[in-house]
Amino acid sequence: MVGAVVLAAGLSTRLGRAKQLLPLGDRTVLETTLAAVLASRVSPVVVVVSPAVAAAGQPRLRDDRVTVVVNPHPERGQSSSLRVGLQALLKRAPEIRASVTVLGDQPLIPPALIDRLIARFQEQVPPPLAVRPVSGGQPGMPVLVSRELFPEIMAVQGDTGARPVLQRHRDAVVTVEVDCPAIHQDLDTWADYLAICRALGVAPAAGPDEPAGGQVQPRPERPEQRNTGSEEQPE
């Protein structure tokens, strides 16, 4: 059994508003991401949200496979959300073999990509400690981690995910080559949001300088990309 932890408790400090709640058609960013996860083979799914996101009633998408938990201290960094999520996953499914960590602000991740990570994990004997996708020579998210790594990951502190653990066990981490730029895309800025709206063909919400449904401007080149060394920092 392979489950998933969706990290959606980030404080959205760069964007200045809760990115999890931004609309994408008739769903939010978080709900769109969660729908993609549920369309894959993972089960069960734990969604970790902040108190603010929980107060907004998100996610509204209901499924028996989903457990929503609140990280009461999201300011303590992403490691705290991952710890809360893995603890809830183990409580819900004590027999779990692995978990796929998904960022709640990556609504363009295709379900088939998650399934490829699971297939790679299950076909190898013995199973690898982690499986991560690589596109264009760069690793990205989501990442699958074996249950064997859960104790080490839950011991991590600060605003980082599983990166230090995966680096420590890099010889036991396998990769899956994919043609999927979405593994490098997240939502940190308004330009990121507009790019996602454009990709999905939906009108954006009102932004800092334009009305709702306004012209979607081309996404400017960003001088830096997410550090994709299998970390999950921007929640």
Image: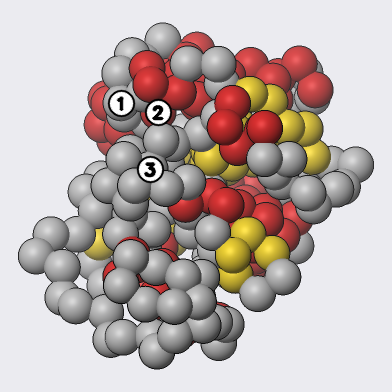
Residue 127 is at least partly visible in this image: no
Measured along the vertical axis of the image, is residue 147 above or below residue 221?
A: above
- The spot of residue 230 in percent (x, y) is 33, 44
User: Residue 12, labelled with which disc?
Assistant: 3
- The spot of residue 43 in percent (x, y) is 78, 43
- Gap between marks 2 and 1 measured at Cα: 5 Å
Nearer to us: label 2 or label 3: 3
The residue to which callout 2 is attached is 78
Whether residues under marks 2 and 1 lie with C-beta atoms below 8 angstroms apart, the answer is yes
- Gap between marks 2 and 3 measured at Cα: 12 Å
The residue located at (31%, 86%) in the rendering is 217
The residue to which callout 1 is attached is 159
* Disc 1 secondary structure class: loop
Tell me the quadrant of the picture where the N terminus can be found. Answer: top right
Mark 3, Cα crowd under 10 Å, few <14 / some 14-19 / many 20+, is some
- The spot of residue 40 in percent (x, y) is 72, 59
The residue located at (39%, 68%) in the rendering is 207
- The spot of residue 91 in percent (x, y) is 76, 16
Measured along the vertical axis of the image, is residue 187 above or below residue 203?
A: above
Q: Earlier in the sequence, mark 2 or mark 3?
A: 3
